[in-house]
């Protein structure tokens, strides 16, 4: 039972929730700017901060529980591929070969553009498996994952400012640690998470701007469709504006497997 709870991500999500609300409670109870605003009857900033924390938690669970685009067996039965280089034809009478995702423990068929931006990944346009949300990041939840990182970073930076505002002086080091112990612990947690989320958000924005997944960036030498490209060449790059537009502004399904010539920018 305990093993199943770990597999479903229960402990990871519970830890995130408890840690978030514990830090929030400490910031509200100590003599910080939030507490001072409450005592003066100025509730705008406390309410906005509380709503930002709630939004970050809701986005966390949405991204964590969202289907990233898993390729299931029933999805591909009876589908015939028009291009043999980008998909494997599976007939209704045949049984697709299955593999199990090493992270999600989900059985998925080896097919459907498996040689075009999927390879051995369990979902469409697989980016990476995030242990903090205990879910894969793929075509369906990648956009929301970046939005979550942005909201989380705003909440963390604001919490960092609030925690610093509550540090009070003490006559001795011992009294100072007693008075600020919980705030210092919150400050350490928020500070570390702020750095991690900042780096993660910056990396993802860069990869999105060049239309490259984390897996392609980290394992370029092992990917069959990138071996013939130069070290700096990305056949999926359409330019920064087009890449960002396709990622953030296009609601319909984007043909991510299309490749483009670097000079002509015309699809092949």
Image (cartoon, rainbow, N blue to C red):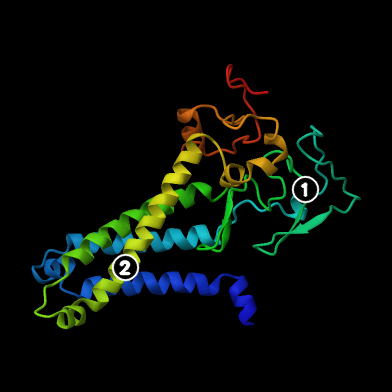
Percent of width and height locating residue 64: 52, 61
Q: What element carries label 1?
A: helix
Percent of width and height locating residue 143: 49, 46
Q: Nearer the viewer, residue 75 or 124?
A: 124
Point out the tag, 1 or 2, that comes first from the N-terminus.
1
Asked if residue 137 can be seen in this view, the reply is: no
Percent of width and height locating residue 142: 52, 48
Q: Is residue 40 left or right of residue 64?
A: left
- Picture quadrant where residue 168 is located: bottom left
The quarter of the image holding the C terminus is top right
Q: Going by the picture, which residue comes out furthest to the top?
A: 264
Q: Residue 124 carries which label?
A: none
Query: What residue does disc 1 label?
Result: 76
Q: Is there a contact, CB below 8 Å, between mark 1 and mark 2?
A: no
Q: Residue 188 carries which label?
A: 2
149 relative to 187, above or below: above
Question: Which residue lies at the image location 64% right of the left edge and 23% below the top edge?
Answer: 267
């Amino acid at each position: 039972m305990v093993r199943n709870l770990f597999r479903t991500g229960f402990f990871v999500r519970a830890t995130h929730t408890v840690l978030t609300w514990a830090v929030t409670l400490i910031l509200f109870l100590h003599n910080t700017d939030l507490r001072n605003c409450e005592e003066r009857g100025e509730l705008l900033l406390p309410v906005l901060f509380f709503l930002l924390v709630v939004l970050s938690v809701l986005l966390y669970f949405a991204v964590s529980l969202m289907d990233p685009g898993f390729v299931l067996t029933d999805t591909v039965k009876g589908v015939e591929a028009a291009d043999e280089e980008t998909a494997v034809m599976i007939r209704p009478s045949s049984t697709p070969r299955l593999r199990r995702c090493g992270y999600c423990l989900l059985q998925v068929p080896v097919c459907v553009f498996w040689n075009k931006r999927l390879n051995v990944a369990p979902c469409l346009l697989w980016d990476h498996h995030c242990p903090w949300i205990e879910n894969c990041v793929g075509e369906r939840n990648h956009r929301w994952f970046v939005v979550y990182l942005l909201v989380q970073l705003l909440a963390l930076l604001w919490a960092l400012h609030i925690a610093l505002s509550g540090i009070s002086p003490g006559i001795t080091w011992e009294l100072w640690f007693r008075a600020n112990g919980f705030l210092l612990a919150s400050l350490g947690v928020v500070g570390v998470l702020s750095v991690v989320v900042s780096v993660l958000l910056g990396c993802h924005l860069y990869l999105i701007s060049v239309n490259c997944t984390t897996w392609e960036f980290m394992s370029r030498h092992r990917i069959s469709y990138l071996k013939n490209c130069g070290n700096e060449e990305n056949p999926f790059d359409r330019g920064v504006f087009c890449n960002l537009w396709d990622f953030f502004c296009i609601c319909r399904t984007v043909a991510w497997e299309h490749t483009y010539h670097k000079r002509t920018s015309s699809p092949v």
